[in-house]
Amino acid sequence: MSESETGLPGPTAWRDVPCGLVGEQHAGRRIRVAGWVHRRRDLGGVVFLHLRDRTGLLQLAFSPDWTPAPVMDALAGLNPEDVLAVEGSVELRPEQAVNPEMSTGGVELRVRGFERLSESAALPILVAVPPEEELPSEELRLRHRVLDLRRPEMQRNLRIRHLAANAARQALSDDGFLEIETPFLTRRTPEGARDYLVPSRIHAGEFYALPQSPQLYKQMLMVAGFDRYFQIARCLRDEDLRADRQPEFTQIDVEMAFVNEDDVFAAAERMLSRILREAAGIELELPLPRMTHREALDQYGTDKPDLRIPWVLEDFTEALSGLGFGIADGAREAGGRVRGFRVPGGSYVSRSRLDAANEAARAHGARGALWLKRSADGWAGPPARFLEGAAGDRIAGSHSIESGDLVLLVAGPDTETAPALDALRRQFGKEAGAVGEGFRWTWVTDFPLFERDVESGQPVASHHPFTMPDESDPEALVADPFSVGSRAYDLVLNGTELCSGSIRCHVPELQTAILRVLGMSETEIESRFGFLLESFRYGVPPHGGFAMGFDRLVAMLVGTNSIREVIAFPKTTAARGLLEGAPSPVAADELAELGLGLR
Ligand code: ASP
């Protein structure tokens, strides 16, 4: 199904045909259309005016030959973005006037009369932005979002968003999922961010939390026997500001009972393939590839590998140690490695660029980056003098380094080198034009259950605390938490985490052990999650699910980097709503009513 075959608006009290759907089939007919004044051209005598609605543009032609004189006079007073209802006859354009760029480019409406339904004041930002002109600043666009949304690009983005949501609903419904809503006013949920709190007026001093996700509810829906749940769910997280984060965002939230990873992936893939087909005309090749968390870190230095870049990390420790090259020997002795990647034909890269790479590696927590170039004259770079003769031939052979290649290397423990190697691989991939086209997906599986908090060193959940561990003994889990793996997974698209989920922990004793590792006392566990654990006491099916970042997915489908381009009324990067002016101060008496006062 292409975009044009899906639902479009039809005739209404004010119009016979939407503007963009007027065509040759209407030639000779008298019709009424309605829309906004887009652009106008005066050709001395004849005036052409584009009328716009959601479906597109229609050329209106005004001429003393067919338009009554009072109507010609009224035309002079029109402003851009006035709303008109227009009556006229559809005529085929003469051949030289046909505009193949416009869906209605074969016809025009010869105007007999119009009514101005509403007048537009002078515009703070243009709607009909000429193609050669830049858009206004994002701040202005968001402040005047209603006008900004009228632009065809924004209309298209939100239409694709709708098609994607619709496809997801259809696919999941066909697979037996039920759409069930869960509360907005709830108790704190555990996705690791700060909650937005809502003071309760009736219970002064108590607060609801807005959901960071429907995680606990969807699990309880499984315990409640619904078997398959989904929701296109709004999630709210009071996180620190970052370029492409929104305090509220949308996830396609899914949960299934009696499943393992294969079942969950298959359902997610069926849904995705329908979304891609119906919203973007893309055929997805299934099943999507998989790799384990360990493989991802080993081959790409990250759990979000951008597979559009074909380069894979290699271990150069063997080839570079024992030659007197202190950095390699030192790394090896300390239990680390020298890892790196080959930039084929990259020997043109300048010294200053390589110095910058060294700095970038340090900024990502490594001790620096090394480089190695091979040319017809031999080797260049810090390890070069150790590679004369057989050692050079060995490394060239074992790592397929050709004349003209560059190799970037980082030495140290894997945990230190991985972020630097990931960053360098992405940077050089981009600069060398090695980022392939299209969509490259992979599931990443088998995450560790816990990670170390960067500041405190304490265990934090890698995914969230409701993930099934691969350790079935609660005491062993508490004793050595960092050695425990989990059944969490992510779906990564072009280096971005698009979806994550897990098979859940449905064993109450294990669940309690996980929460204990996270530093919660028995009382805290009982007060925060007692309701979930209690539900598990009455027969809980094994279950699992995922949540897919819907804003990000749609952004990728329409080809934009910013999720604000696919959200009708987003917040700024500083979490403000510029259109409505949110957040806003609240008067002291209103706060008092909530049992609150400002410090
Ligand atoms: N609730 C999780 C999240 O929002 C997704 C899941 O585990 O299903 O990331």
Image (cartoon, grey):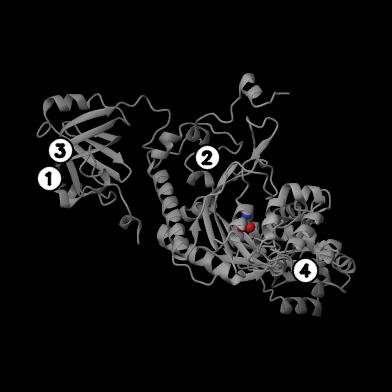
Q: Quadrant of ligand 1?
A: bottom right
N-terminal label among 3 and 1: 1
In the displayed structure, 466 sits above or below 42; it is below
Q: Amino acid at mark 2?
A: Pro
Q: Give the percent coordinates (x, y) of residue 466.
A: 69, 58
Give the quadrant of the N terminus.
bottom left
Q: Nearer the viewer, mark 3 or mark 2?
A: 2
Checking the image for residue 570, the label placed there is 2
N-term mark: 3 or 2: 3
Between 508 and 476, the one lying in front of the other is 508
> What type is the residue that disc 1 sits on?
Arg
Q: Which residue is mark 4?
A: 471
Q: Which residue is mark 3?
A: 88
Q: Which residue is mark 1?
A: 29
Looking at this view, name the residue that lies furthest to the front.
538
Q: CA distance from mark 3 to mark 4?
A: 75 Å
Q: Residue at x 52, y 43 (%)?
A: 564
Q: Residue at x 42, y 31 (%)?
A: 125
- Classify mark 1: helix, strand or loop: loop
Give the residue displayed 32% in from the left and 53% down from the top.
Answer: 7
Q: Amino acid at mark 4?
A: Glu
- Where disc 4 sits, the SS reads loop
The Cα–Cα distance between marks 2 and 4, rounded to whole angstroms, is: 42 Å
* Viewer-side residue, 124 vs 522: 522
Q: Amino acid at mark 3?
A: Gly
Please indicate whether residue 177 sits to the left or right of residue 385 in the image. left
Q: Quadrant of the C terminus?
A: top right
**Sequence order check, earlier mark of 3 and 4:** 3
Q: Are marks 2 and 1 in contact (CB under 8 Å)?
A: no
